[in-house]
Amino acid sequence: MRASTGAQALVAGLERQGAERVFCVPGESYLGVLDALRDSTIETVVARHEGAAAMMAEADAKLTGRPGIVFVTRGPGASNASSGIHIAQQDSTPLILFAGQVERAARGRDAFQELDFEAFYGGMAKSVTEVRDAERVPKVVVHAFRTALADRPGPVVVALPEDMLGDPCARPIGERVELGETAPDAASMQQFDDILNAAKRPLAVVGGSTWNASGVDVLRAFAERAGVPVTCVFRRQQLFDHEHPHYAGDLGIGPNPVLRHAVEETDLLLLLGTRLSEIPSQSYTLPVPGTPVVHVHPDSQEPGRVHPTVLGIHARPSAFLAATNSTRDRSDYIGRLHASYLDWSKLPHPAPGDLTMGRVLHALRELDDPDMIVTNGAGNYSAWVHRFHRFRRFGTQVAPTSGSMGYGLPAAIAAKLRHPNRTVVCFAGDGCFQMTGQEIATAVQYSVNVIILVVDNGMYGTIRMHQERAFPGRVHATSITNPDFAALAKAYGAYGERVERDADFTAAFERARNADVPALLHLIVDPEAITPTATLSAIGGRTPSRMT
């Protein structure tokens, strides 16, 4: 394969790498690429904001395991996209941002919309490259894919000077990048099996981004054979079937106290693919000092970097699990942890107000749809999703471990484009939704019939919760005045409906699911229902009442 211009070589390279879809906001700085995309096999999805476009690409990568692709223009466009790049960095997601740049002769003069990409993105991206010679484009594409996928996956940024894209390129298009599994050495595996066989209360903590459906199957088989309970880290719950008897719950914000105690008391903590960062480690208080830790990670620099280990293994989780030989029965121990999880996630759940998130999650659970994809952004509303929704299969959760607001709707659009025959439900708070709510227009334009549940309590709930805890009774800058979200959805050409009572939710959801357009349900909830375990007044010290 050969192309005649740098822009054509770039698009041909993406086709060779198997890219089926790119997300963008158009800009004059990369018109040559847009023209080449018009003649390609690649679908171009036009978002309304560069941050949302990057989030769509990042979510798509979560679902495919291949780098998500986003195109933005120079300066303001590239700056706007940084929210998605930060998500990819913290979530270890392979992502490639191609951004327009000013002409080469204008570089260094603070030209119109010029940006120093290395200075701006150097702390977020795995690599930042500016392509000044069109003949280098094929190699740059291959290098970008390889870098995004290798070791700990992450984002790569490629800047494209506008005039370079029209220059001739006679170089052949590079071959598709495929990375093999990093297998552990035999000595390390024997040492691990010995440690595991001697443990009475082992606990596997799974996370990271290098999983796929077959890897999750291998994990389940390992847990059953080796007699090990499994807990998932924050927003990686899709990695283990919640109804499997070896599931112990999620190690996220406000975990089940029984699970936390199990982490504190374990005699072998097996970290699989996860960095066990701030949230799952409960602000780095777990594991407790002296806990034997075996850390398996695809990046050789990660084991032992934060948490002391008795054994660090450089390998991808599925390759490691396939090499284990341990077999043991710990059914009583495992059964107690799973029973505690089932009790912790029992629905319906008490909360103040006429419409409660417990009833909403109960209704979704009653659908018995194990293939339903659930997305969300950041906010206290997501605590109900993480605690009460039971994820059954890989590829059904798309959420930012970085805690980025506005993520849910762009992620839902990407998920529905990838899996058009599956139900895709986006949870978003009223503040969270308004970060990227204009992307309803994108959903309507591409007939992406997602279901958006906007949880409206009239405030930035998470910040208000912390404000009540730190400065009780001194509310400031956390209240928000909201529009009629259902009417807003209708203005975009979507279906919209307001829901104010538990008894009305199931029927409203069915109407949304049966609509032939994207749908939004505006859920009015009581501001007192700030977490599944405490009211806002209780946190502020105005009442001792707590929920269970």
Image (cartoon, grey):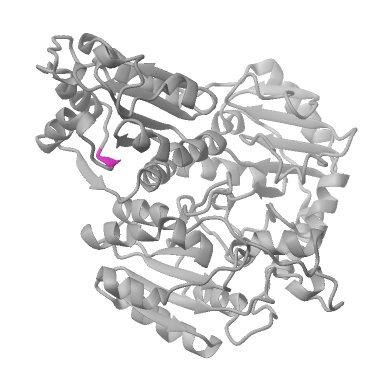
Regarding residue 514, the answer to whether it shows in the image is yes
Regarding residue 429, the answer to whether it shows in the image is no
Which quadrant holds residue 202? top right
Quadrant position of the N terminus in the picture: top left
Q: Quick check: 379 above or below 266?
A: below
Residue 9 image point, x, y percent: 18, 20
Quadrant position of the C terminus in the picture: bottom right
Left or right: where does residue 507 sit relative to residue 3?
A: right
Residue placed furthest toward the right? 290
Q: How many marks?
A: 0
Most prominent secondary structure in the magenta stretch?
strand
Residue at 18% from the left image edge and 12% from the top image edge: 172
Left or right: where does residue 48 sit relative to residue 342?
A: left
Asked if the magenta segment contains residue 430, the reply would be no
Residue 193 image point, x, y percent: 74, 29
Asked if the magenta segment contains residue 21, the reply would be yes
Viewer-closest of 243 and 275:
275
Q: Quick check: 470 above or below 323?
A: below
Which quadrant holds residue 144? top left
Which quadrant holds residue 342? bottom right
Q: Quick check: 353 above or below 54?
A: below
Viewer-closest of 235 and 76:
76
Residue at 55% from the left image edge and 86% from the top image edge: 502
Left or right: where does residue 198 sit relative to residue 136?
A: right
Residue at 80% from the left image edge and 61% from the top image edge: 471
Residue 427 image point, x, y percent: 49, 64
Residue at 37% from the left image edge and 47% from the top image edge: 56
Residue 437 image point, x, y percent: 39, 61
* Magenta extent: 20-24
Viewer-closest of 33 and 422:
33
